[in-house]
Amino acid sequence: MRLRSEVFVVEQKCVYLDMDDKDAQSVHLFACEEGAAEGVSARAVVRLVPPGLSYKEPSIGRVAIGMESRGSGLGEELMLRAIRVCYRRWPGHGVRISAQQYLIGFYQRLGFETDGGGYLEDDIPHIQMYLPWAGLSHWHVLHGNVIESFADSLRALPKDLLKGTAAEWGGMQVLEHLRLSEKHTWSYLEKKCQVDPAELKGCDLNSDARGLWLVRELESDVRWIDPTPGGLLSPPPGKSVDVEGAIIDWKNAIVRGYERLDKLYDAEDWWRVLVFKHPIAGRIGLFDTLAFGVAHIRHHMHQLKRIADSDVF
């Protein structure tokens, strides 16, 4: 509350009653400096308003970042965490915000789109923005799109870079690795749903952090080694270089996988609990499990580029 007053009332020279009747009904997410003395302002704060209070959807508002933390990435981290909290507390709902217009680009990078025209709120230009619910159909589309991008990169490889060796993967081994990884993920999720979600541990800020870390690492250019015992996800060199046939088989497997998930994970409670254990990141929720699948393919697109740029073969 102190940070909100510092930013919205003092810094923005806006005389209004910041604390209102929505605060007691909202979820408050904030970041404090470790070891900060009592009474010191938070570094960042946001409130998550339940659906039906400000809008029919849950909303994120009162986003404030302390002056000393601006430009550090803390604002993006706060919003990514806030979106995850909204999705698991109110699954099935998108998220609406009333954004200051100079921040439209920032929110667009997080997936929000403008909705309607601009308006003044306390003499400051604002505009509503909306982030759709990221359910299974959303991830199915993203998964399909990234497979198409991967396929284009694979098709561009010369034939002698497709097979690879035991020491250096070729393009077809990368594809087979992705298919093996997804096969084990689908299998894990199918087994997990045999229990009542009420019996599983719920997602929290720690699992959110693990999911965010995993996606960020995969979407970076960091090189990983197979984290599974015995190299379970490291395929041997294959003889086939039928790129188009392999891509079609992969796409069909993805369709079947999402069809099974649609039936098995139709209850909203599944979005609130930990459903998958990644060998490095640990236990994560359904949202981050699906995000991992998409980020994993993007990660191996970096590998295809390294193969294309190499002269190993």
Image (cartoon, helix red, strand yellow):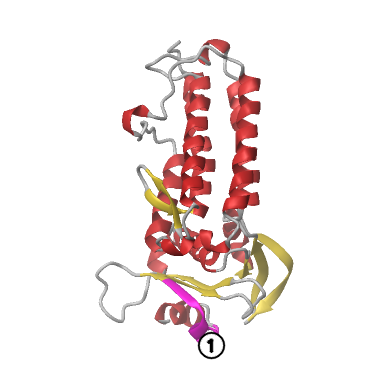
**Residue at horizontal 61 percent and vertical 20 percent from the top:** 243
Q: Is residue 236 or residue 168 the one in the foreground?
A: 236
130 relative to 251, above or below = below
Location of residue 53 by image quarter: bottom right
Quadrant, the C terminus: top left
Task: Find numbered disc 1 in the image and state the secondary structure of the residue it sits on.
Answer: loop
134 relative to 220, above or below = below
Residue labelled with disc 1: 20
Q: Is residue 82 or residue 284 the one in the foreground?
A: 284
**Residue at horizontal 58 percent and vertical 53 percent from the top:** 109
| Residue 56 colored in magenta in the image | no
- Which residues fall within the magenta stretch? 14-29
Asked if one can make out residue 264 in the rendered structure from this viewpoint, the answer is yes
Residue 229's x, y, as percent?
32, 33
Residue 248's x, y, as percent?
66, 27
**Residue at horizontal 27 percent and vertical 80 percent from the top:** 38
Residue 286's x, y, as percent?
50, 53
**What amino acid is at disc 1?**
Asp
- Please indicate whether residue 145 sits to the left or right of residue 5 in the image: right
**Residue at horizontal 47 percent and vertical 47 percent from the top:** 191
